[in-house]
Amino acid sequence: MTRDHRRIRVLTLTDLYPSPRRPVLGAFVERQVRSVSDQCEATVVVFIRVFPGLRLWRRLFHPGQFISGLREWIAEVRTIPHRALRHGIRVHYKRYTSLPRQIFHGVWGLFSYAFTRAYLIALHREERFDLIHAHYASPAGVTALLAKAAMRIPIVVSVHGDDITYTARQNAVSRWIVKQVLTRADRVIVHSRWTATAVSALQVPSSRIRLVHLGADVPQCEPTDVRRERCSEDVCRLLSVGYLIPRKGHKYVIRALGELVRRGYALEYVVVGDGPCRSELMALAREEGVSECVRFAGEVAPDELSPYYDGCDIFVLPSVSEPFGLVFIEALAFGKPVIACEGTGGPEDLAALGDCVALVQPHDVRSLANTLSALMADPQRCMKMGERGRKVVRSHYSWGVTANELCGVYREMINT
């Protein structure tokens, strides 16, 4: 087998990857690794930060609650295996500890490298990797950059968004670290044109930046026409999938829902995901008088999302910071019209390929309500948006396309 066609040995480093404790965390990283398994021999090292979260420390002056919470946290950490075989891929879960994220996220990689250096070098001696693929600049990118000197193999860093929108903006030290990682990486992978522009602003040479989209599996059968099959055909079902944090914009959907219900529309809103804003969002639904219309489904494993996508009429997630947004691709794969915010990266790339995504103004309830109203009044447009979306995913965003693009970057690196 020639060097150009042999299976590439890749060491994937990440702090976001599914585990028994958190089966949804980093599912997009796992899916990308799985997509290249026909062409690559992948080994994954997952950095597990072992340090009690802020929620636990808030109970410090309540000894009973603190001890109880600490025991629960220890039990959760113990559920994470040290090694696992997931979908035929070897996964190593390595513990480390570090300073709090709220101030020191940029330096986490220094800690993860200190805790795992010997293990990574030993793994390389055994596996003889061709390259390291780090997901996020910190901690994985920092660790990869430091490990490069010992392993003497090239590194590629995937920027998923938070590197730019959170870590690099945290403080001067974190920004300097992110810049050092990205400017010294052999290649930097981005998932949208917005992210490419942001990475270039950190003085990363354009010759090292590669655009590789994340993907989705397009169902073989045509999506179910749930509006025809549902008993109450006049009810429009909305869906959001995402972590319940402020920037995802769930509260704007609930407020828009309240406005539309008051106008006389019959709506249902299914929220898939969990997070710190759940109680706040449930209270907002009660305040808007739409609690009976909103269902919080909680966290759902990626392999179990299909019925939710297939069962909605419109997918809506007005996130104010979404450099890519894999859930938009997944909704389009099921032939659903999508509503997202303009100026956020990934959704604008999709909209540029045709009328499959309706863009609304960020933080604007009226804009969102009017867009929802317009789509509900135009079922023909919704159908055409869904058809166009499926074509866009097939041609530009399938996992097969992703795998070929990513392996092209890998081969380019090891043959340079």
Image: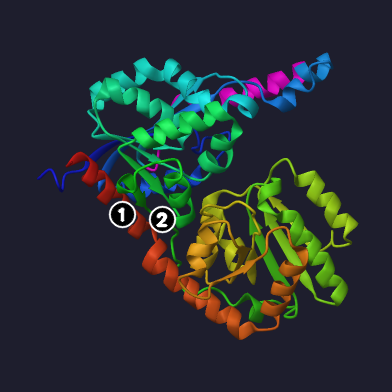
Taking depth in this image into account, of 137 and 219 the one nearest to the observer is 137
- For image coordinates 88% across by 55% down, the residue present is 286
The range drawn in magenta is 67-87
| Nearest to N terminus: mark 2 or mark 1 | 2
335 relative to 252, above or below: below
- For image coordinates 73% across by 76% down, the residue present is 373
Q: Are marks 2 and 1 in contact (CB under 8 Å)?
A: yes
**Quadrant, the N terminus:** top left
Q: Which mark is residue 235?
A: none
Q: Which mark is residue 405?
A: 1
- For image coordinates 26% across by 23% down, the residue present is 151
Q: Is residue 42 left or right of residue 260?
A: left
> Of the residues shown, which amino acid type is indicated by label 2?
His
Query: Which quarter of the figure has residue 185?
Result: top left
Question: Residue 349 in the image: x percent, y percent?
Answer: 48, 63
> Of the residues shown, which amino acid type is indicated by label 1?
Glu
337 relative to 184, above or below: below
Q: Is residue 220 visible?
A: no
Say what secondary structure mark 2 lies in.
loop
Q: How many marks?
A: 2
Question: Residue 407 in the image: x percent, y percent?
Answer: 27, 49
Question: Residue 45 in the image: x percent, y percent?
Answer: 40, 30
Q: Is residue 160 visible?
A: yes
Taking depth in this image into account, of 159 and 28 the one nearest to the observer is 159
Which residue was labeled with disc 2?
Answer: 213
Q: Is residue 321 left or right of residue 258?
A: left
